[in-house]
């Protein structure tokens, strides 16, 4: 994955995105999600690093699943009620709500994991040059790269501001009221915003001094080309995408994945 052209990986991500939104089986979605996680581990991303990047998203997804189960189902007489929470009739757990909650979980987990693979195996510099090779104006390409590089810079500046405020004794008191919490967050956000605006101003002045964008064409020292491995990867991805698409549209004479509800019915009933 590290040696592939960024455009070939983008094609793979487009195929993956289309497929996971067309899949209706939770079993197949879970298989694809765990396959992407295994692919991330095979790409040199350690499990600790992957879990650290997915930790915040997993917490959000857990709360999202719980909220979707309780509030994302339209009551209907034909809807199957799995059970009642705490044996209370006004807290039914419906099959449709559980299905869509877990489907959203696997879709977000797959997309986020694939984005981690792309960001960890792709240099932004190579990605920009690959976009330029597609005849995209270099102004937009470099603007995109600057925007991407400012994301870790904002995180680093926020950490520096927090350490500087702690060194001055700000925020050491207990944040036990809403007013104190608001003041602490507002001061840190304001200080971070000021430092980022100053850095962005320095970046814009530097680009103006170098006459960035004065010519329509630009000579690049680095060229990112498609290699044999890229053509092979795109070919394999296209074949897998086509087969999966034909399978989902039921054009292939293969058995469909059973639903989890039918499996649980066979086990427990």
Image (tube, grey):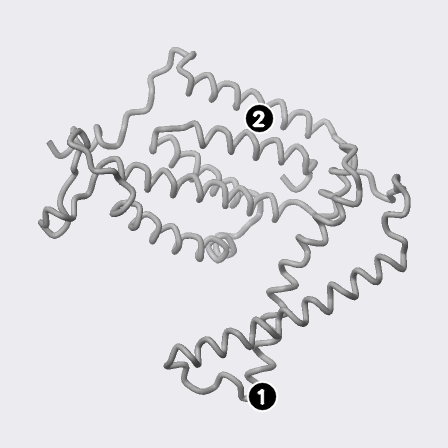
Quadrant (top left/top right/bottom left/bottom right) for the N terminus? top right
Which residue occupies the foreground of this view, 136 or 241? Answer: 136
Mark 2 crowdedness (10 Å alpha carbons): few <14, some 14-19, many ≥20: some
Q: Residue at x 56, y 75 (%)?
A: 188
* Element assignment for label 2: helix
Residue 207 shown left or right of residue 241 in the figure: right
Residue 99 horizontal/vertical position (percent): 29, 36
Q: CA distance from mark 2 to mark 1?
A: 55 Å
Q: Is residue 18 above or below residue 112?
A: above
Residue mark closest to the camera, 2 vs 1: 1
* Element assignment for label 1: loop
Q: Residue at x 37, y 81 (%)?
A: 176
Disc number at residue 168? 1
Residue 219 shown left or right of residue 139 in the figure: right
Disc number at residue 237? 2
Which residue occupies the foreground of this view, 194 or 54? Answer: 194
Which residue occupies the foreground of this view, 184 or 236? Answer: 184
Disc number at residue 7? none
The answer to whether the residues at label 2 and label 1 have Cβ atoms under 8 Å apart is: no
Write down the quadrant of residue 30 in the picture: top left
Residue 152 shown left or right of residue 214 in the figure: left
Q: Is residue 113 above or below residue 269?
A: below
Q: Residue at x 86, y 48 (%)?
A: 213
């Amino acid at each position: 994955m590290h040696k592939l052209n960024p455009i070939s990986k983008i094609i793979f991500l487009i195929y993956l995105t289309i497929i996971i939104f067309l899949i209706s089986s939770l079993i197949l979605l879970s298989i694809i999600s765990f396959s992407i996680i295994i692919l991330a581990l095979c790409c040199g991303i350690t499990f600790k690093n992957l879990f650290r990047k997915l930790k915040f998203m997993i917490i959000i997804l857990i709360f999202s699943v719980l909220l979707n189960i309780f509030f994302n189902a339209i009551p209907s007489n034909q809807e199957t009620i799995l059970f009642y929470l705490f044996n209370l009739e006004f807290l039914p757990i419906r099959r449709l709500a559980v299905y869509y909650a877990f489907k959203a979980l696997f879709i977000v987990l797959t997309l986020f994991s694939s984005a981690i693979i792309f960001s960890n195996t792709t240099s932004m510099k190579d990605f920009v040059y690959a976009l330029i090779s597609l005849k995209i104006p270099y102004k937009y390409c470099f603007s995109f790269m600057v925007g991407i590089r400012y994301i870790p810079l904002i995180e680093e500046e926020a950490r520096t501001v927090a350490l500087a405020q702690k060194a001055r004794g700000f925020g050491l008191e207990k944040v036990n009221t809403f007013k104190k919490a608001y003041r602490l967050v507002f001061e840190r956000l304001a200080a971070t915003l000021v430092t980022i605006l100053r850095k962005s101003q320095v970046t814009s002045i530097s680009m103006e001094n170098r006459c960035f964008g004065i010519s329509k064409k630009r000579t690049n020292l680095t060229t990112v080309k498609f290699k044999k491995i890229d053509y092979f990867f795109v070919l394999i991805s296209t074949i897998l995408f086509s087969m999966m698409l034909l399978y989902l549209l039921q054009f292939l004479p293969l058995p469909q994945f059973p639903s989890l509800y039918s499996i649980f019915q066979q086990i427990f009933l």
